[in-house]
Image (cartoon, rainbow, N blue to C red):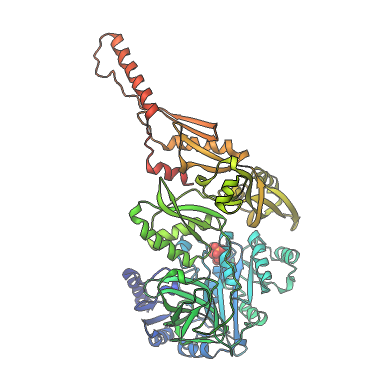
Amino acid sequence: MHKTLSIRWSLIQAVGVVHSHPARRCKGTVHWPWQGSYSWNWNKGLSTTNWVKNAAEASHSESSSGAVSELSQDSLLREFAKMPVERIRNFSIIAHVDHGKSTLADRLLELTGAISKNTGQHQVLDSLQVERERGITVKAQTASIYYKYKDELYLLNLIDTPGHVDFSNEVSRSLAACDGVILLVDACHGVQAQTVANYHLAKQRNLTVVPVLNKIDIKHANPDKVCHDMQLLFGIDPDQVLKVSAKLGTGVTQVLERVIEVIPAPRVERNSAFRALIFDSWFDKYRGALNLIYVLNGKLEQGQDIQSLATKKAYPVKSISVLRPFECGVASLSAGQVGLIACNMRNSKESIIGDTIHLKNQSVSAAGSYRPQQPLVFAGVFPVDQSKHVALRSAIEKMVLNDSAVTVKVDSSPALGQGWRLGFLGLLHMEVFCQRLEQEHGAEPIITAPSVTYRLVLGNPKMIRQQGTDTMDISNAALFPDPSSIREYYEPLVMGTIITPTEYVGQIIGLCVERRGLQQSSVNIDEARILMKYVLPLSEIILDFHDRLKSISSGYASFSYEDHGYHLTQLVRLDIHLNGKPVDELCRIVHSSKATGVARQMVHKLKDLIPKQMVQIAIQACVGSKVLARETIKAYRKDVTAKLYGGDVTRRMKLLKQQAEGKKKMRLFANIRVPHETFINVLKR
Ligand SMILES: Nc1nc2c(ncn2[C@@H]2O[C@H](COP(=O)(O)OP(=O)(O)OP(=O)(O)O)[C@@H](O)[C@H]2O)c(=O)[nH]1
């Protein structure tokens, strides 16, 4: 059977029906090696006939106490329809990067029979190509699973979240649809910076926390010490901490049972008008925007008309499905349940994460208790050539639908043409977004150097009148006004949390000081580790702070940060001049104390990037009229005496003199040809 299934799988991949997101995999008839097959009908939604038949074949050989593999998909779907609220649990797994969230999610899916143990596939919920290549989760993924506990069948909606600080928007978005969290901590590395940040995020939302220690199978794991740290930092009773090995599956059953015991059932109402929160969405080229919703009130049935509270637009519900973790059609969704709806939303901008949907012509209040995070890092995104502009715009729109933390504004540059200025939560977020643009939409954008948004207080009455306000937010250095019209400069700050073994403290303090950081506090977690809080300028950490921190601490220190407002600073605009002419695309806003260092770096880089030409090129980095750094690219020296065979030396000298005079003229009038790639490469990090 396995052979047949793997052939089917290869065939699906070969014909390109399968897309990278599991929930998009539903055009035509799709066969899942481990779950069976289902067929898609645009009007009727998912037919479950084949699904049921093949799911029975794929049932698991291994049955555990609460596994529901003995139940057919048909009866599970019937159970779904009549599942009372008291037997639903909605929860997320939150943790620091690499503490094992996706591995634990795999075990939970296997244990509950949602996937087979023998798929050979790891981190099933990390389905994006970028996630598999980088080995990190970047998108929160949902799976509805069933578990039998004390003879009652429970529906558990599990959300696997990313651990990296740049994707914390995914965590807060997911928590809006949850009543509790599994707080997973690596038993070797202990509590890390993102564990602290995520714990507080869950507490702010009053969610029940199920503390779990993972990787207890590793030899040098120290569960007692980590439990002690959790008690010190979060006040968690060590006796309440479950100890598991997600890799081996040890203790995973207890996790599921604890979730059922302590996480409350959703506080929702079934006997009122339908109301749901959109908490994720993505684009399917056949069905348009698909919305993942959490139903707070009432019931939604296929064929009903829904309306968006934000846009007031109405749509017919074409299909409803649950993610198990792959799409499985259902007839309705009731309060407390999480499901996916397709409703002919053709324009990706109409699907807004955090929006409330309700039945057409009914009035309800907003369900949304989720606000997207403000972007911190900005970069220009341009098509390689302008003929690709429309395709890139459509790709960006679709990607933004799937990643609501990204902001988009139209931008243009004389060197790179028409493009956009996108806002991201961090550099990794930016890299992943651009990689996804390439991998999922075939776009090849040019990304300019990332920068942050500075705030200027203007002192020039004419400018204030033009602006209508005396403050101006600026992230594009080319738009930096004349310094004489600026009264005050402000830059964004972050509150950074660093957890490190004590032996690296000296070097880390050195790094923070170099980055203009100010220490706020320092707490010993235990005799070997310390937690430090630093206020740091955002512009100093976006590029390589994290890498430097990891390298000086041999990978042991962890860092997370949150927005900490703006503070008064001193900024300058650093201009690059080529033979005396300023080049707008290359200018940057820098702190005045860093201007000389950045100036030297830039001219040095440009010297390597600009090809030699017939004239000498002077590269200068200036602040106003003051030159901070200079490099010269020597001109080609054409051998004008090559044609001379011997002869008088004065003739040779005459030719060289003529050449020198010609060059002088060229230098004066020279319009240096800077290749397009030079701009791209110098702007790129
Ligand atoms: N020895 C051991 N390794 C584990 C265990 N759980 C996870 N791992 C390993 O830890 C690494 C990270 O696991 P993931 O599940 O990807 O971690 P994650 O928290 O989902 O990572 P992000 O989503 O990127 O934050 C993988 O190499 C896993 O095989 C465990 O219980 N024991």
Residue 242, compared with residue 548, is above or below; it is below
In the picture provided, is 43 more to the left or to the right than 411? left
In the picture provided, is 511 more to the left or to the right than 34? right
- The residue drawn where x is 45% and y is 75% is 290
Residue 459 place in picture, x, y as percent? 62, 45
Tally of numbered tags:
0
Residue 552 place in picture, x, y as percent? 62, 47
Answer whether residue 199 is visible to the viewer in this image.
yes
Q: In which quarter of the image is ligand 1?
A: bottom right
Residue 82 figure quarter: bottom right
Residue 563 place in picture, x, y as percent? 64, 57
- The residue drawn where x is 34% and y is 78% is 28
Residue 1 place in picture, x, y as percent? 37, 79
Answer whether residue 572 is visible to the viewer in this image.
no
- The residue drawn where x is 71% and y is 51% is 502
Residue 454, compared with residue 115, is above or below; it is above
